[in-house]
Structure formats: structure tokens, C-alpha cells
Image: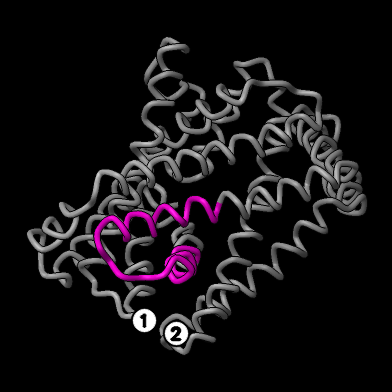
Amino acid sequence: MLKLGIRFAIALLIIGVLVWIGDGIAAHWAVMSQLTPLAAVLALVAITLGRTVMAYKWLRLMRCFGAVMPLSIATQIYCAANIWGLVLPSTLGVDAVRTVCASREGLPARDVIASILVERGIGFIIGASLCLVSVLYLAEQAVLGSTLYWTGWFAAALIVGLVIGMWLSFSEWLHGFVHDRLLRRVREGRIARTLRDLHSAYLAFRSHRGELLLFLGLTVVENLVTGAAFWLIAWGLGVSVGLVDVLAVAFVANLVSRVPISFGGGLGVFEAMFVLGMSVIGIPTTEALSVALLGHLFKILSWLPWWIVYTLRAGRIGVPASDRA
């Protein structure tokens, strides 16, 4: 795992190179300053709605265990974790913060972790599927450059691996192999018992297939709504590009940006892939990078009010101490 400083340097380097290619800071500022207030408000609303859907579908998973939490609190936790996640090592850090915060609301940590594992698994499958569909769409439009074909193969391989992995993770065979054979000698130890309880909680989702299907559908909706925010920004900047084209490029960039080599949720990596994708549909680097940077900025701005409310309610600003280890 790359250290935070190295990841931050990588993000700055990528952004710096892209700005240089796009004719410098002044050119990008000239483009971004053209954003209309209406487009900015609509983009913020779309991103906030997407984050609220994420919190809601997470709550639906938690309700499988009988856990109850107001949607407003879940959204606060989600957004606060993302703010703290800007300075944490990876998405695992964000999930650790969510686990601690949800536990402080009275939810069992075991159930929270199990729900996050399911959330991440399905989320990756949907992300990879949307990426693959996007690559096929761009290829059908005869605008896909050979430089992006590898993302389609990457997405396809990821989908196959994730589906097999999810299928195995829900099997009794794997549960028995891990806890009755692999950990047989230490099965009565504290760590082994904790892992066994967590795995059992995870397997409980097998009896809630309806909720899993709903979660899958809401994940698609959340991705569509969040992706639409980038089109709204492009529209507000006067960039002539279709909604479906922007969604396709955003889905490809979003999947690649999940590789944990950069800072702040894929800053730099997302922008590079977004610029590359927009270039194959004829959008100049300066305009594409301006859209991507504003999208990243608006994500953070949409999280801030929820983070402020949560920290005021919790009475603390810093990352929970137990997550710093």
C-alpha cells in the first residue's frame, strides 16, 4: 500500500501534467469560470442525491439484521467517512470509519462489517459491468480509441473474478473449509471466533435475495445519478457533449480510479481516464479536465455539510482514534 504522501504526489503529478497538456492554469480557469450557477446547483443536488441513495441502500442491508438508523444519520456517517477518507490510506480506511461511527450509534460492528463487505462486492461488480457496457457503447459508436480497449478486457476479467468470488463467499463449503479445516487448530481462539461470527453474519444475506436485488438496482441508479452530475457540469460550461457519452466515459474512469495509487478517491487517476475518454469523442483536454476537476470539487462540497453536522453532533472533528492504527 502506497503511503499517503506518495499517493498525494502522484495525484499532483498527474494533474500537473494534464494541466500542462491543456495549455496551463489560465486556460482551465477561463473554462471553469464559465460555469453557470444553475448547473452548479443541479450538479451538487445530483451528487448529494447519489450519496443519499448510497446511504439508503446500505441501511437496507443493515435492516436484514433488524438494525434501525435514520437515513439522515446514515448519510452523515457516509459523508463524514468520505471527508476523513481524503487523508486515510485507502477505501478500507473509509470503511473502518463507517464501522466505528455506526457502532457508536448502537449497531453491532459484526453486522456493519458484513454489510460493507456485501456492499463493496456488489458495488465492484456493478462498476465493472457499467464500464464494460460503456466500452461496448463507445466501440459501437466507432469512437473508441485502441488505448481504451484494455479497460473493456480489464472490466470483463474483473466481473468474472468478482462473480466467482461472491458465489464462493456465500457457499457453506467455503465457510466449512475456512473455519473447520484451515483454522481448525485455532478455532477456539478469540480472533478465529470473531472471524467465524463475521462470516456467519455475512452468510445470513443468502436468505435476503430480494434485498440484494434491490441493492443491486439502487447501485445502478446511484451510479447513473452521480455520473449525470458530470454532464450537468459540462452543460453548464457550454461543452457540447451528450449525456450518454459522458456517462460512458465517467463509468470507465470511475472503475480505473478505484486502483489505490492516488489521493482523495482517485484524484488524478480519474481525471486522466476522463480526459482520455473524452478525447476519443472529440472533447479538448482543457474542457474535459475542467469538468473532471469541478466534479471532484463538487463531491467534496456535497460531503462537507453532512460532515459538519455529524462532527457537531458527535462533539469531535478528528478521525476516530481507533481508526488511526
Give the residue drawn at x 10%, y 63%: 27
Up-down: is 111 above or below 14?
above
* C-alpha separation, residue under disc 1 versus residue under disc 2: 6 Å
- Which SS does the magenta portion mostly show? helix
Observer-nearest of 308 and 240: 240
Q: Is residue 94 left or right of residue 176?
A: left
Q: Quadrant of residue 125?
A: bottom right
Disc 1, SS: loop
Residue 144: mark: 2
Mark 1 vs 2: CB contact within 8 A: yes
Up-down: is 234 above or below 207?
below
Up-down: is 250 above or below 151?
above
Disc 2, SS: loop
Q: Amino acid at mark 1?
A: Val
Residue 121 placement (x, y as % from top left)? 67, 52
N-term mark: 1 or 2: 2
What residue span does the magenta drawing correspond to?
223-251
Is residue 198 a member of the stretch shown in magenta? Answer: no
Judge the density around disc 1: few (<14), some (14-19), many (≥20) Cα neighbours within 10 Å.
Answer: some
Observer-nearest of 23 and 40: 40
Q: Amino acid at mark 2?
A: Leu
Q: Is residue 99 left or right of residue 51?
A: right
Q: Quadrant of residue 63?
A: top right
